[in-house]
Amino acid sequence: MKFGLFVPQGWRMDLVGIEPEMHWGVMAGLARRVDANEDWTSIWVYDHFHTVPVPSEDATHEAWTLMAALAAVTGRVRLGQMCSCMSYRNPALLAKVAATVDVISEGRVEMGIGAGWYEHEWRAYGYGFPSAGERLARLREGVEIFRQMWTTGEATYAGEHYKVDGARCWPRPLQGTSYPGSRANGIPMWIAGGGERKTLRIAAEYADYTNFDGTPEVFAAKSAILRRHCDDIGRDVSQIVRTADYNVFVGSTERGVEERIGQLADRLHGAGVPEKVVDRQVAEARRGPLVGTPEMIVEKLRELEKLGMTYAICYFPEAAYDTTGIALFEREVIPELVDRREHGHLWHLGRR
């Protein structure tokens, strides 16, 4: 199994109480920590503009600006976003941005992409809020433009939502040119979302990785649907790495786990989040698969691995304030499961 870690960027109110001039130091410090531990494969940010669980005046740092900055302060770890919203940026421009960050990072970019869902920020930024069908149609058209630009250096495409005519992408990403990358896409493509008719169909056609609900029952069901889409188009489903995101609350004892969940509640209360919303967040936290002692989490991950979940992207809500949970996870969870063998897009792990 491979492991990635979300860097706190504010979106989930995970920088509350830290002065803005300290934000980058916190983020960069955690990135360097992960970079120094080869059991972590990747670091991740979210592509959002307004905080959750409620929009507020607390910080939310922009994803692709952070991608470039994180590329410059790390040298080994992979860099991804879970996930970029196709409609927030023209896809030809986003393909160019990603290619530039791939050069800055010396070939370490993972391209997470999805249709988008956070209506409040869509409307606030003037994007409207198209129907799910239109958002998914934009996703399909955009990933085709990505593929053309990254693999040929140029895209010409006339779709219903996006039209490009000789959009150039030079230099192309290092992945697929100077360094190994996705055979089909250059930069590895993560199609995020579990929509059964359209999103998973797009994933079957274009994805190197999928990312959908990581609870065992739902993960198994979505995996079966992905397999059927792959069968329909004649693709081997084993070519797609299936991943999931997890909120991690780990403690040496169950009391320690409850203390971490309580810290989340305290921080949300301190940020002015309404009581009912805090109660809902706490209830959701307790239901997560990766909540418990290291032994409990290892057992759950082994169950998920048997279902085909081979890459866990982990979010520690307290990471900006307290890294003891991360340290415990590094000591007692990852070594039980991590696959240290080099494979596929992880070519860089052997570079020194």
Image (cartoon, rainbow, N blue to C red):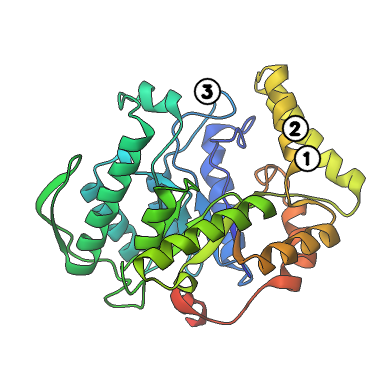
What residue is shown with label 1? 286
Q: Work out whether residue 315 can be spotted.
A: no
Q: Residue 62 location in percent, x, y?
A: 42, 39
Q: What residue appears at the point 58 percent right and 32 percent down from the top-left corner?
A: 19
Q: Which kind of residue does numbered mark 1 sit on?
A: Arg
What is the count of numbered marks? 3
Classify mark 3: helix, strand or loop: loop
Q: Which kind of residue does numbered mark 3 sit on?
A: Pro
Compare marks 3 and 2 and give the one earlier in the sequence: 3
In the image, which is nearer the foreground, mark 3 or mark 1?
1
Label 2: few (<14), some or many (≥20) within 10 Å?
some
Q: CA distance from mark 3 to mark 2?
A: 18 Å
Residue 80, labelled with which disc? none
> Tags 3 and 2 in contact by the CB under 8 Å rule?
no
Say above or below: 244 vs 182: above
Say above or below: 78 vs 157: below
Compare marks 3 and 1 and give the one earlier in the sequence: 3
Classify mark 1: helix, strand or loop: helix
Residue 282, labelled with which disc? 2
Say above or below: 227 vs 288: below
> Tags 1 and 2 in contact by the CB under 8 Å rule?
yes
Q: Is residue 77 left or right of residue 295?
A: left
Say above or below: 260 vs 74: above
What residue is shown with label 3? 55
Q: CA distance from mark 3 to mark 1?
A: 23 Å
In the image, which is nearer the foreground, mark 3 or mark 2?
2
Classify mark 2: helix, strand or loop: helix
Which one is in front, 49 or 2?
Answer: 2
Q: What residue appears at the point 17 percent right and 46 percent down from the top-left corner?
A: 159
